Image: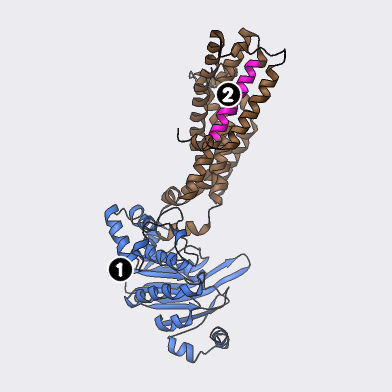
Chain colours: A brown, B blue
Amino acid sequence: MNLIKPCLFQLSFWLRLAALFSLLLLGGCADNWGWYVVSPATETGRQNLAFLIDGLYYTMALSVTAISISICLGLIVALPGLSARRTPKTINRVFVELVRAIPILVLILWVYYGLPQVAGISISVFWAGVLALAISDSAFQAEIFRAGIQSIDRGQYEAAQSISLNYRNTMRYVILPQAIKRILPALGNQLVYMLKMSSLVSVIGMQELTRRANELVVTEYRPLEIYTILVLEYLVVILIVSAGVRWLERRLDTS
Amino acid sequence: MTRSSDKPFIQIQSVSKHFGQFCALDSVSLDIELGQKLVICGPSGSGKSTLIRCINRLEIHEKGKIFIDGKIVDGSPAGQDVLRNNVGMVFQQFNLFPHLTILENLMLGPVRARQLPESEARDLAMQYLERVRIPEQLDKYPAQLSGGQQQRVAIARALCMMPKIMLFDEPTSALDPEMIAEVLDVIEELADSGMTMICVTHEMGFARQVADMMLFMDHGKIVETGPPKTFFTAPKSDRCKLFLSQILRH
């Protein structure tokens, strides 16, 4: 819980949150709101709230798994892009351009409905979602890594070469630790982006935040309140994640 | 020290290098024996840095051949091996690894490239840190040290690979004036201990002290060579005379 701490101490965070809630309360006074569906004061309200918030587990699991895979994949794709030779460079360009051209939603549908037929495998909703998100994000990760690595001074490579480090060790011990420090803000943005994009996996039935909200709307007929809660859920999660990334940046900065 | 051939330790045979249209090295030939201390001077753009960077294959020469210890340096595995085992380099901009502590900077090469156990690498690092007179800074990061200290760490880092020859590429040009002496002292000590070295520098007082051969370059060519005594007092070429009179005027 160390991660949230710094943001919880920041006044601006609470001010922003307070402003939001007061807006909602103002709205809540109007006739067309029916907060009872998600009111913590009633038994059904509590059940509905719990049902909605439970989706957080899958949203987080999806995003975190997908971004871990996409970071590894992105690095693998980025390295040939830094080569001086033509073929590896072309492979990198083709992958990045192709993947960036496919909408995430389309990729999710294709991986879930198409891939099992093409590859003759069965794939769960969760892993289909993870795979689609990871592939689509890896193209962006690759570009981030490439820029980060290219920003490292040439003298660092020369120094590594002069103490006989091979390519792998140069990358692992000299270049990447410095590059990652520089691209951390961009990686943080990608994580936030991923959290938001994970909502698209609801279309193939993943029980994450958005899917749960949709299902509750169907039974309760109160889209306004339920989707408002959904907005708040994403907002809180993403504000916390952003604060965590900023904290990590500051920590890396001092060392 | 074992030698696998009786030829000069480093042989540079008509090496040329262009950067686009610019000719940085124009068919340069040079032999260096073990134990020799060679100081290269010359105006900027004359090819001095390019020459020593070619020896270390940081620049890849287009024509000619470079042999170290009788083996050709051409990017082949054998050529890379001979570089790895023999040549250390110190850069103008230090090029320390900013994310590692001083000790880690020194241990990285021995541990990762030489597969030395960490404890041995640490002893080795401490030994050389003492030699460059900053053993107390081992846990600091490069940015916390002065320029002179950083350059001394860079020298220690190169020495930890136990090279037979050290290349210095303007080691004091990026330093504040009051820090030049501490770095030159360390290099001088190293020279006295018998290390073979090639040093590109504008510090002529230091050159006179340390060099057993001076080398003047201009427009990618070696214009004049000679022992420091005759080089400084009676340069033969006009270009060298002019250069020395300009650099020694103050």
Q: Quadrant of the N terminus of chain B?
A: bottom left
CA separation in Å, label 2 and label 1:
72 Å
Please tell me whether the stretch drawn in magenta is mainly helix, strand or loop.
Answer: helix
Q: Chain of mark 2?
A: A
Q: Nearer the viewer, mark 2 or mark 1?
A: 2
Tag 1's secondary structure? loop
User: Are the numbered discs 2 and 1 placed on the same chain, yes or no?
Assistant: no
- Residue at x-position 45% and y-position 59%: B144
Q: Is residue B249 visible?
A: yes
Above or below for B150 versus A152: below
Mark 2 sits on what residue? A233
Viewer-nearest residue: B137 or B235: B137
- Which region is colored magenta? A225-241
Viewer-nearest residue: B5 or A24: A24
- Residue at x-position 67% and y-position 16%: A224
Q: Amino acid at mark 1?
A: Ser
Mark 1 sits on what residue? B4
Q: Quadrant of residue B22?
A: bottom right
Furthest residue in direction bottom, as rendered: B234
Q: Chain of mark 1?
A: B
- Residue at x-position 48% and y-position 91%: B233
A23 to the left or right of B66: right
Q: Amino acid at mark 2?
A: Glu
Q: Is residue A136 visible?
A: no
Tag 2's secondary structure? helix
